[in-house]
Image (cartoon, rainbow, N blue to C red):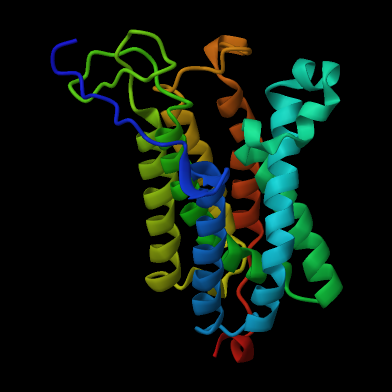
Amino acid sequence: MIGVIPYPEFDPFAIHIGAFGIRWYALAYIVGLLVGWRYCLFLAKRAPALVKTTDVDDFLTWATLGVVLGGRTGYVLFYQFDLYRTDPLEIIRLWHGGMSFHGGAAGVTVALVLFCRNRKIPLFAFGDIITCAVPIGLFFGRIANFVNGELWGRPTDVPWAMVFPNGGPEPRHPSQLYEAGLEGIGLFLLAFVLDRVFKARLRPGVITGAFLIGYAIARSVSELFREPDRQLGFLIFGTTMGQLLSIPLLIAGVWLILRAKPVAAEMAA
């Protein structure tokens, strides 16, 4: 236990309102969506002018529904299916926790396709702008995981190990912070550089494809330090559910980059 960093004692509620309150996890979703929305507006105003700011405004509600419904559905199907099969009402008890990024990504993708089809917006151009903001939500979400003392890492003897309240007596990797760095900061910088330096939005689909590949790699690496979900454990060939679910993202990312075509010159101005 020598050299172990004490885990900070956090109040599970970020804001208290009488007998009620807003939990850190809920606040992370709210802040992530709002900051992401403002960043998307900023990008939409910059060349290439492929998307209207009014479309970004209107998509916020669609994105919120996609994240919540998709994230919850994905968690139910991939991580706790037996629990929700025996107690279906648990599905609507969101305050008990349980969201899946891969499910949320699927939910937002469905919302994106339907929204763009309804508005007759170029799908991949709009998707690239939305994708640039996704790491913001990932960052706040992983920080909330750390604050909640959940999704901790595997036992370790590194100097920055922590003993989590519900993780047993062993010092563990603060894997939530690893994920915040890789999935949040790292992927935000990747999308930022592709947009600003390489002008990747001139080839719609490249930023989204690069993000999917980057997320698949970042998640697979972080899963090497993260404790597998207790109800699932290790799966085929010693992999985790997070790693297996990242394989389709990797394939989709490669496909998007390979099919990307330059926008017309008059639209690039």
Q: Quadrant of residue 246?
A: top right
Horizontal side of 149 relative to 40 (left or right) equals left
Q: Specify the quadrant that holds the N terminus.
A: top left
Query: From where the camera sits, is residue 207 visible?
Result: no
In-front residue for pair 252/215: 215
Q: Residue furthest front?
A: 18
Horizontal side of 223 relative to 26 (left or right) equals left
Identify the residue shown where x is 28% and y is 21%: 162
Q: Quadrant of residue 56?
A: bottom right
Instruction: Estimate the x, y position of residue 104 in percent, counting from the top left.
Output: 67, 45
In-front residue for pair 239/181: 181
Identify the residue shown where x is 55% and y is 48%: 18
Count of marks placed on residues: 0
Query: From where the camera sits, is residue 92 visible?
Result: yes
Q: Quadrant of residue 33?
A: bottom right
Q: Specify the quadrant that holds the C terminus.
A: bottom right
* Rendered position, 26 above or below 166: below
* Rendered position, 190 above or below 163: below
Horizontal side of 16 relative to 65 (left or right) equals left
Instruction: Estimate the x, y position of residue 66 in percent, counting from the top left.
Output: 73, 52
Instruction: Estimate the x, y position of residue 252 in percent, counting from the top left.
Output: 66, 46
Identify the residue shown where x is 64% and y is 30%: 96
* Rendered position, 31 above or below 161: below
Instruction: Estimate the x, y position of residue 127 in percent, counting from the top left.
Output: 64, 64
